[in-house]
Amino acid sequence: MPALTTLGMSGAGEDDAGLVSGLFNTTQQTGAAVGVAVLSTLAASRTEGLLGDGEARAAALTEGYRLTFTVGMGLVVAAIALALLVLRAPRADERAGGGRSAPEAPGVPEARAATAL
């Protein structure tokens, strides 16, 4: 989880770090709540359907959970595939410091040299 938070906050500047943090946490919490609700609904629907067809309670529950875990696994695989397609490694000029740099402190020319270390 800390790696995901670091990734989510990696592009935030000092001015918008609070906003980005709030949006990231809200999105994470909402996504988790919706995900649990959808997967629970799938499990309950599958279980109820099988119980209505005369399946044993244990078998119906197992099939409901099996469906939920299969859908969850599919969502994880889709998320990994999306991350591999969307996320990219930084270009060579960004790694060498050619990207966004820290602003120079007014009246203190040494501040820029210290942040470059």
Image (cartoon, rainbow, N blue to C red):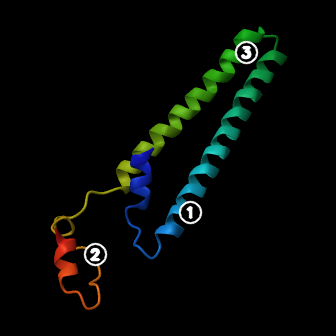
Q: Earlier in the sequence, mark 2 or mark 3?
A: 3
Report if the CB atoms under discs 2 and 1 are less than 8 Å apart: no
Callout 1 secondary element: helix
Viewer can see residue 37: yes
Given this view, does label 2 or label 3 mark the residue nearer the observer? 2
Closer to us: 110 or 94: 110
Q: Give the residue number, with chain letter if any, for mark 2.
A: 100
Q: Amino acid at mark 1?
A: Leu
Q: Secondary structure at mark 2?
A: loop
Q: Which mark is residue 60?
A: 3
Q: Which residue is mark 1?
A: 23
Q: Which mark is residue 107?
A: none
Quarter holding the N terminus is top left
> Which element type, helix, strand or loop, lies under badge 3?
helix
* Quadrant occupied by the C terminus: bottom left
Name the residue at 66% across, 15% down: 62
Image point 77% across, 11% down: which residue? 57
Type of the residue with mark 3: Ala
The image quadrant of residue 91 is: bottom left
Q: Is residue 51 left or right of residue 102?
A: right
Horizontal side, residue 108 vs residue 45: left or right: left
Image position, residue 100 (x, y; %): 28, 75
